[in-house]
Image: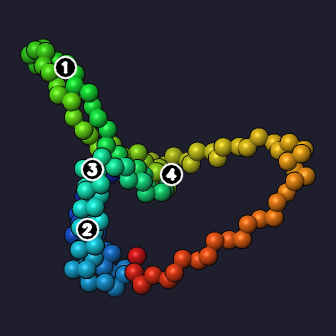
Amino acid sequence: MSLRHIHTTTKKELVNRIADKTGQTKVVVKDIIQRFLDEIILELSEGNRLEFREFGVFEVKERAARRAQNPRTLEKVSVPAKRVVKFKVGRLMRERVCEEPAPEPKRQAPAKPEQVAKKEPPASPPPAPPASKSPF
C-alpha cells in the first residue's frame, strides 16, 4: 500500500454522491442511509449477525472477563466481560481494498462412473423477481 494522504469520507459526502448518481433528493438519500445504519445497529444490539454477500459480515462476539496489567504501573487489573462488534471482510472488498486475490474455489472430487451415467435434466431457472421502483 502506498503512503498517501488518507481522506475521511463523511455521511454527507456519501449522500451527495448517491443523490447525484440516482437523481434522488439529498433528503431522501440521507433518510435511507440513516435508516439502513439504524437497522444495522438494531440487529447487532439484538445479538444478530448481518451478512452482506461480497461485502462482509458483522457479528457480535462475547469477550470473557480477564486479568490484565497496566503497562505503566504494572498493576494487575480486572477487565470485565464485554460484547464487541467484529467485521469479517467479504471477497469483493478483499480483492479491491486489500489487493488480495480471491481464494481458489474448492475443487470437487471426480465423479464416480455410476454418477456420470445418471444425469438428470437441469432444473428450470427460477422466475425473475418483480421489477422494483427503487433507485437502488
Do tag 1 and tag 4 residues touch (Cβ < 8 Å)? no
Do tag 2 and tag 3 residues touch (Cβ < 8 Å)? no
Does 80 appear above or below 88? above
Q: Position of residue 77 (x, y in %)?
A: 12, 19
Q: Amino acid at mark 3?
A: Glu
Q: Position of residue 92 (x, y in %)?
A: 49, 55
Q: Amino acid at mark 4?
A: Arg
Mark 1 / mark 2, whichever is N-terminal: 2
Q: Amino acid at mark 2?
A: Arg
Q: CA distance from mark 1 to mark 4?
A: 35 Å
Residue with the mark numbered 1 = 68
Mark 4 / mark 2, whichever is N-terminal: 2
Mark 1 / mark 3, whichever is N-terminal: 3
Residue with the mark numbered 2 = 35
Along the horizontal axis of the image, is 32 left or right of 57?
left
Residue with the mark numbered 4 = 91
Q: Position of residue 121 (x, y in %)?
A: 81, 64
Residue with the mark numbered 3 = 46
Q: Amino acid at mark 1?
A: Ala
User: In the image, which disc is placed on residue 135?
Assistant: none
